[in-house]
Amino acid sequence: MHPPSPALAAFREARVEYADVENGRIAFRRFGSGPPLVMVHGWPVSGATYRHILPALAREYSCIVVDLLGTGSSEWTDKFTFAFAEHAESVRAVVDALGLESYALLGQDTGATAARLLAASDRRVRALVMANTEIPKHRPPYVPLYVHIAKSQVLWSNVRLTMRVPFLRRSALGLGGCFADLSHLDGEFHDLFVSILLEPGRAGDGQRRYLAGIDWSVVDALPATHAQIQVPVLLIWGADDPTFPLALAKKMATQFPALAGVRVIEGARLLVHEERPEAFAKHALEFLKTLPTSNVSEAKSIN
C-alpha cells in the first residue's frame, strides 16, 4: 500500500451518507458549497476517482460524489440488476434525498451513460458534463468480451488470475487503454481500484456485476436519449482514448440539441480526469460558470 495523496486523504475525511434504493443503499459524499454538482463515475472505479478534481470544483460548487451500487461504500442485494436505468434511478434517489430543485451532472464512462438517462428524464438537471463514455453503435475493443465473461463467476475468476500478470494488465487487453502514461496504473490508483479486480471478495464481485450489467441495446438507443436532453452539454475527451475514439465522440456530439462544445485534452486516454485533472477541472469550471445562478437550490441535511 502507498501513502494516500492529500487529495485521497481529503476524500476519505468526508462523511459517507446513504440514500435508500429498492435493492440497496447508494453511498455519497459532499464537498464544498455552492450550486449542486452531482458526480457519477464509471468502471472499474468508484467516487474516489474524482479525488484530484474535487479541490478545484469544490471551491465553486457543492460536489455530491456518488458510489454507484457495486462500488465503493454502496450496498446492494442480489436483486439489483446493475442496468444503466437502475444506476440512473439510484442517482435520482440521492437527488431526492437531498431535496435538490436543480443541479448539474458530471459523468464519465458508464457513469455518463447513466447520467444521460437521468438528464433526459429529470427536469431538475440544468447541465451535463460528459467525459469519455459509450458511443452509439460503437463497441470498444475487448469490452463486449469482458461483459460476456463477467456474467459468469467462474470465467471471471480466470480473467482475474490473468490480470495479476503485470504485462497483461498493462496491455491493451487489460487496462492499458485507461492511461497514456501507464505509470498511472501503479501507486494510488492500483491500491484504490486495480487491487479490487485482482482479489476475490464482495468488492470485486460488485465490479464484476457492474460490468456484466452493460446493455448495448441501451447504448445504441442513446441518440433518442440525446435528443431529449435540452440542457447545455459539454464533452471533455482524452485525445488518445482507444476505448471511445475522439472522432466518434465528435460525431456523437452533434446529437445534443444544446451542445456547448467538445474540449479535447491531449496526452490522455479513457480516465482523462485521473490523468490530466487540472485541465479537466479547468474545462468543467469554465463551462459551469456560464450557467445561470438564480434559483439554484442548496442541498438539505439528511441527518
Image: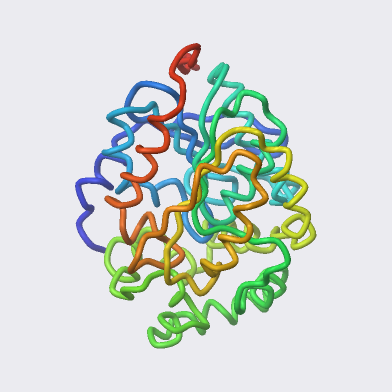
Image quadrant where one finds the N terminus: bottom left
In the image, is 201 to the left or to the right of 254? Answer: left
In the image, is 77 to the left or to the right of 287? Answer: right
Q: Quadrant of residue 195?
A: bottom left
Q: Nearer the viewer, residue 186 or 276?
A: 276
In the image, is 41 to the left or to the right of 221? Answer: left
Residue 107 image offset from top left, x and y in percent = 52, 46
Q: Nearer the viewer, residue 104 or 159?
A: 104
Q: Quadrant of residue 53?
A: top left
Identity of the residue drawn at 73% across and 43% down: 227
Residue 91 image offset from top left, x and y in percent = 60, 35
In the image, is 70 to the left or to the right of 266? Answer: right
Residue 261 image offset from top left, x and y in percent = 49, 48
Q: Is residue 64 shown above or below 301?
A: below
Q: Quadrant of residue 214?
A: bottom right
Q: Nearer the viewer, residue 214 or 56?
A: 56
Q: Nearer the viewer, residue 128 or 189?
A: 128
Residue 117 image offset from top left, x and y in percent = 69, 42
Identity of the residue drawn at 72% across and 73% down: 148
What colour scheme governs how the chains and residues are painted in the rendered image of this protein? Answer: rainbow
Identity of the residue drawn at 48% across and 43% down: 73
Number of numbered discs: 0
Identity of the residue drawn at 67% across and 33% down: 21
Q: Is residue 69 shown above or below 290?
A: below
